[in-house]
Amino acid sequence: MAQAFCSLDPAGVIAAQLGETLTAPQVILANLWLPLCGIRAWQLSCRSTHTRGESIPAVATVIVRYRPSPRSERQLVSLQFAEHSLSQDCRSLYALRMGSLSSLLDGVTQFEFVKVRTMPQLGHSVVIPRNAGTNGAYAVEPWGGRITLTLESDFFGSVSGGLIADARAAAGRDGGTSTFGSAVLGDLLEVAREWAVVAQCIDRYLRAVGKELRDIHENQCVSLQLAGFPFVNTRGLFDCPGGKPIRAPELQEALDRLALGHRGIPKVPLCMDEAPMGQVTPANGVNHLCDTFRKDSATRCRERRETDSRSMRTV
């Protein structure tokens, strides 16, 4: 199972040299249980560190073309799937394996992988990192946004969409009117796995009915999460100061650090696309992020607004 591969011996990880390969099993990938032809894949684990400086096993699935690339230089595309599953067995690390039962329950990974299938045929290599970390924490700090490049790499840029740029905006807007209310609840539960102050706040202010829902909600794939409680009122599950969990005084420092942009402007060209009608990730978080980037005179920020989407590029 996924947990067995991800949970390596901590002593062995600490003893390894930075960048040393810990495990590299070759795997057979499948999309909706259909095996992928013309590619080879490995799931690599190497010694690394996260943003808190602790030793970790960095895990990623690497996909290459079976035949030699038609180009002399091979481009590397790094892709992060949308993180919405509370179960480790629904992570892309395991869901993409041939014969995994979670592939039938995790529609996000399966449908998003369709756009990956053509990349090796074009001569590109693909790496799918496990950004959610050992505890499966929705790619939040200290695991998310960690970039390590070799000196010979020429990093072209980054493209992203559906960003939760501001956790306050995502959690504060949900009051039982969003069909993705259960995904917002899952966000809180996932962040609590890496942030002790968030876990303590949930334990302190969560109502009895919320604790019962939490027991059911934990360790579920995204399909079961969304189908089970589509209109859950996340704010109504908490009895905390101000009526909203995001207003709890002890959470303010953590929410500031979870907001994108708090560590300065991007070091690489970045393009973000956000839909104003997004039910999980409201665009006002990206609006604030854009304003934050503009405060730096060295940043060039270009926006394009349309009826159904908004894109922003920073250089």
Image (cartoon, helix red, strand yellow):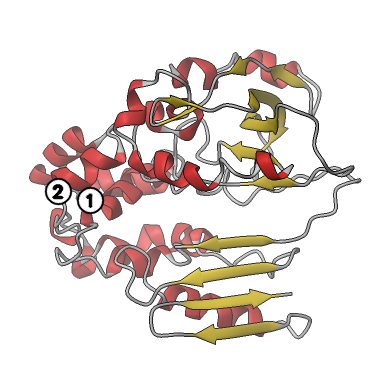
Question: Of 108 and 182, which appears nearest the observer?
Answer: 108
Q: Residue furthest left?
A: 209
Q: Quadrant of the N terminus?
A: top left
Rendered location of residue 34, percent (x, y)? 43, 26
Say what secondary structure mark 1 lies in: helix
Residue matched to label 1: 182
Query: SS class of the residue under badge 2?
Result: loop
Q: Is residue 243 left or right of residue 117?
A: left
Visible in this render: residue 139?
A: no
297 horizontally vs 302: left or right:
right
Q: Are marks 1 and 2 in contact (CB under 8 Å)?
A: yes
**Percent position of residue 71, x then y:** 84, 44
Is residue 305 visible to the viewer in this orientation of the structure? yes
**Residue 89 or residue 291, whichever sits in front:** 89
Which is more toward the observer, 62 or 123? 123
User: In the image, 145: left or right of 108?
Assistant: right
- Disc 2 residue type (three-letter): Phe
Residue for point 64% across, 76% down: 313
Provide the residue designation for mark 2. 229
